[in-house]
Amino acid sequence: MSEQKKTETLSRAAGMADDFDPEKAEAFLLKHEDKEWFSDFATLLRMLTTDGYSLSPSTWAVIAGALAYVVFPLDVIPDFIPMLGWLDDAFVLGTVIATLKNEIHHFKELYEVK
């Protein structure tokens, strides 16, 4: 990646960080916390951070691929386009959750997550 692209990407990231509104984020969490997709996403994050829980190499590959896609600024719909830029990222995350549904369910049973 060229220095110019790095500078542009960092500038966009700083702009996104400046636009982050904690109150809106909390409202979003409260609005969606009872939905299954939200529970599955939260469980997926727990799976990554729980000591003693081992993910299969294929699960790591799916998660790493999705994270790379979401983090990389150039994708199908560029992230700098307001709202639309996150649609493809949301689709990728939804696909990951659907793909890992059995493993998420197993983790919930094993660790008694609701």
Image (cartoon, rainbow, N blue to C red):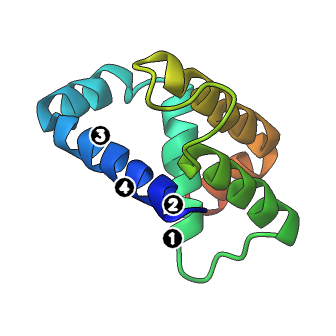
Which mark identifies residue 16?
A: 3
The spot of residue 46 in percent (x, y) is 51, 60
Disc 3 vs disc 4: which is toward the camera? 4
Tell me how far mark 2 sits from mark 3, CA to CA. 25 Å
Q: Are marks 3 and 4 in contact (CB under 8 Å)?
A: no
Disc 1 vs disc 4: which is toward the camera? 4
Q: Which residue is drawn at 31% across and 20% down?
A: 31
Disc 2 vs disc 4: which is toward the camera? 4
Tell me how far mark 2 sits from mark 1, CA to CA. 5 Å
Q: Earlier in the sequence, mark 3 or mark 1?
A: 3
Q: Do the residues labelled 2 and 1 touch (CB within 8 Å)?
A: yes
Q: Mark 4 points at which residue?
A: 10
Q: Mark 2 points at which residue?
A: 46
How dense is the environment of label 4, judged by Cα within 10 Å: few (below 14), some, or many (20 and up)?
A: few
Q: Residue at x 70, y 60 (%)?
A: 64
Q: Which of marks 2 and 4 is nearer the N terminus?
A: 4
Q: Earlier in the sequence, mark 1 or mark 4?
A: 4
Q: Tag 4's secondary structure?
A: helix
Viewer-proximal residue among 19 and 46: 19
The spot of residue 90 in percent (x, y) is 58, 29
Q: What residue type is labelled 4?
A: Leu
How dense is the environment of label 1, judged by Cα within 10 Å: few (below 14), some, or many (20 and up)?
A: few
The answer to whether residue 75 is above or below residue 6 is above
